[in-house]
Amino acid sequence: MRPAGDVLFWPLTSDGGYTTKSAYGFIRQRRIRTEASSSSGQQPHARFWKTLWVVDSLPRCREVAWRVAKKIVPVRRALRVRGMQVEEECPFCGMHPETIVHVLLCPVVARWWFASPMGVRFRSSDIPAYFLQQIFDQQDDHLTGLCVTFLYVIWDLRNAMIYQQKVPEFTGIMAQFSSLLSIAEEGALVRPPVENGLLARNSWTRPGEECIKINFDASWVHSAPTGLGFIARNNLAQVMAAAVAFPIDATSPIIAKALAFRWSLSLAKDLGFRTVCLETDCLQLFDTWMKAKGGDSYLFSVISDCRDLVSSFLNFSLSFVRRTGNSVADHLAKNSSKFHNSVWIEEVPPELESLIHADVIASMAT
């Protein structure tokens, strides 16, 4: 590994490289925070945003809910403020200006919410983000998925009224609602695990003969030390080595994963492995490696170190696997604080034996 030199680092992007988009986002978010602090409106907490993206509904429905909570829905009042010559009245009731709050509180829409299977009642004091947060706080996954899906149906119906002059009927609303729920349910059961066009495995598989498969991972939490995990196994699913590193400084999840990648390559080299295939559950890291682009950011500096290390092996490959196929490395990374900097040769901590056994069973079925 070549000596590391000083590099410029921009803290507002995951790879440390400056972009005008990130600078614009920083200015915009600072303005939003300033406006929020001077208003009496309640803002959703961090758990709300984390939960939103795993709600049991279609991605298109989650996106609309996110836009409502962020107040970036292109309602008529917002469009007029930006200088567009459009009618301002709500397309449902035709009596009040269409604002983001009115999207939920319009008397016509409110009746549909109450008549739906959720039986939701609105209060005049509700605001979109707070209303959604109240639903999420009930910790009822089924109810949350229903509400997020119904919100999408309302917004889709609103667009159909404006652009296609369709007249809303409650039976049609419920038919679309049921259809979306069915698609979401069927998709969860039969949809193959595809990430950005890449078919990913759900479970750990054995490498070819004379190859050592290395799974690695990093556990990153904001404002906390990062931990790294490493597990190497042969074609018989036997453990050749395992390791953890803690604490590691990383400024973002992608930087943490890249540091785990570099550390794993260095460790494999020190252990004398000659033919290796590495697996990561970080799609962004995999894409960055495959695109082979360079740059001045810290991320590309770490990736460049990895390319130098690869030359130490007779054969090398990096592949992408789902988190369920990287469970051992994930567990090691998350529990690295218990072991600090440790290396095990041909063994693992006892708590990992069940995960190792599960991988062996999974590899026999593939």
Image (cartoon, grey):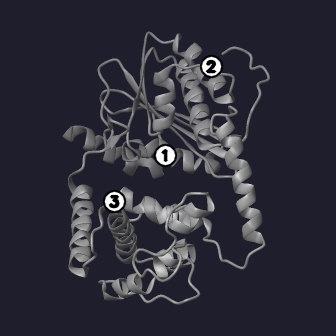
Q: CA distance from mark 3 to mark 2?
A: 40 Å
Q: CA distance from mark 1 to mark 3?
A: 27 Å
Question: x, y percentage for residue 8?
Answer: 77, 28
Q: Secondary structure at mark 2?
A: helix
Above/below status of 63 relative to 235: below
Q: Which kind of residue does numbered mark 2 sit on?
A: Asp
Quadrant location, the C terminus: top left
Question: x, y percentage for residue 187?
Answer: 24, 56
Residue appearing at x 57%, y 51% in the figure: 335
Among the 4 quarters of the image, the one containing residue 326 = top left
Frontmost residue, 299 versus 237: 299
Q: What is the crowding at mark 3: few (fewer than 14 residues within 10 Å), some, or many (at least 20)?
A: many
Q: Which residue is mark 3?
A: 58
Residue appearing at x 56%, y 37% in the figure: 257
Frontmost residue, 175 versus 361: 175
Q: CA distance from mark 1 to mark 2?
A: 23 Å
Q: Which residue is mark 1?
A: 330
- N-term mark: 1 or 2: 2
Quadrant location, the N terminus: top right
Frontmost residue, 78 versus 136: 78
- N-term mark: 1 or 3: 3
Q: Which kind of residue does numbered mark 3 sit on?
A: Leu
Q: Are marks 3 and 2 in contact (CB under 8 Å)?
A: no
Q: Which residue is mark 2?
A: 305
